[in-house]
């Protein structure tokens, strides 16, 4: 995030500026702006920690050392999230899909670290400088449908507050688009369009280390195309699939 965006995020937290189109600031992934969007004071300081920087919920603070458990791998060292074990996920496989699931990349694991419901949305590796334990909220909420007071869905049931079931992915990925797989179009499969040399398609859809990951189709920093898609849904599938 640029210095301008950080200043805008700080002003946004004070209600001084509107959400910035084309950025994370003010979007649903900006946890510093939840109260402003909901027009209530029921969350910040009670249900999660407002670190006053929307980047920190995913990215290590600039002054923090890479202390992530995966920091021996260059792909993981800058993320400010803990990740579930690869073995915890049930992965999509089928007889017609010749490409078998591999290891999930960080571009999927960082998304799932919130959306699989295994840990609180504000559970980070390194908190910002100056953060004190006395500032910690008494509750830390998870995106999970299970029982317990630490589940967002306890209130977000469609009655008390807007329903959130659609963002709760869980660890069963059998009914989701495959992620953590090598892109079949790299192997001369005529059913798929080949990407550019850098793994990016002309419309911005992209591969990561030649793999399809959550961030292949979704861009958390770009809320303008719902739901955080890189391109409109009508164009998305035919970017890769030659149908």
Image (spheres, rainbow, N blue to C red):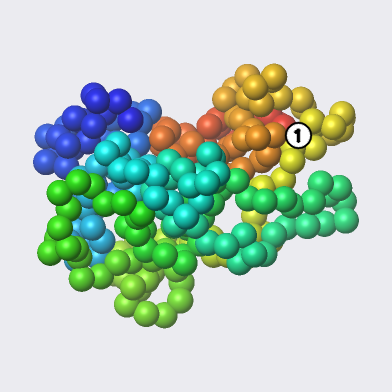
The residue positioned 53% from the left and 39% from the top of the image is 74
Q: Nearer the viewer, residue 101 or 130?
A: 130
Q: Position of residue 150 (x, y in %)?
A: 33, 73
Looking at the rendering, which quadrant does residue 136 occupy? bottom left
Count of number-bearing discs: 1
Q: Quadrant of residue 45?
A: bottom left
- Front in this rendered view, residue 65 or 14: 65
Q: Position of residue 194 (x, y in %)?
A: 76, 25
Q: Nearer the viewer, residue 70 or 86?
A: 70
Note whether 176 is above or below 159 in the view shown. above
Q: Is residue 45 left or right of residue 151?
A: left
Q: Residue furthest front?
A: 72
* Residue appearing at x 60%, y 46% in the figure: 105
Q: Is residue 40 visible?
A: no
The C terminus appears in which quarter of the rendering? top right
- Which residue carries the number 1 mark? 241
User: For the point 72% across and 50% down, which residue is it?
Assistant: 102
Res. 162 visible in picture = yes
Q: Position of residue 97 (x, y in %)?
A: 83, 49
Q: In the rendered view, tell whether residue 206 sits above or below residue 132.
A: above
Position of residue 42 relative to residue 213, above or below, is: below
Q: Which residue corresponds to the image point at 32% horizontal and 77% vertical from the top-left?
A: 149
Q: Position of residue 117 (x, y in %)?
A: 46, 65
């Amino acid at each position: 995030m640029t210095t301008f965006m950080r200043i805008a995020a700080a002003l946004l937290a004070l209600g001084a500026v509107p959400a910035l189109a084309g950025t994370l600031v003010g979007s649903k992934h900006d946890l510093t702006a939840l109260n402003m969007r909901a027009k209530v004071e029921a969350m910040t300081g009670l249900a999660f920690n407002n670190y006053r920087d929307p980047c920190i919920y995913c990215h290590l603070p600039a002054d923090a050392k890479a202390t992530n458990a995966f920091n021996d791998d260059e792909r993981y060292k800058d993320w400010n999230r803990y990740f579930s074990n690869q073995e915890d996920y049930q992965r999509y496989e089928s007889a017609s899909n010749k490409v078998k699931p591999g290891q999930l990349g960080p571009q999927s694991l960082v998304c799932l670290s919130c959306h699989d419901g295994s840990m609180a949305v504000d559970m980070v590796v390194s908190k910002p400088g100056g953060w004190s334990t006395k500032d910690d909220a008494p509750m830390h909420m998870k995106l999970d449908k299970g029982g317990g007071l630490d589940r967002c869905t306890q209130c977000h049931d469609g009655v008390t507050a807007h329903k959130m079931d659609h963002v709760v992915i869980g660890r069963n990925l059998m009914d989701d688009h495959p992620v953590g797989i090598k892109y079949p179009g790299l192997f001369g499969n005529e059913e798929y369009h080949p990407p550019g040399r850098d793994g990016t398609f002309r419309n911005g859809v992209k591969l990561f280390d030649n793999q399809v990951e959550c961030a292949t189709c979704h861009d958390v920093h770009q809320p303008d195309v719902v739901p955080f898609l890189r391109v409109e849904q009508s164009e998305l599938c035919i970017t890769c699939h030659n149908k």
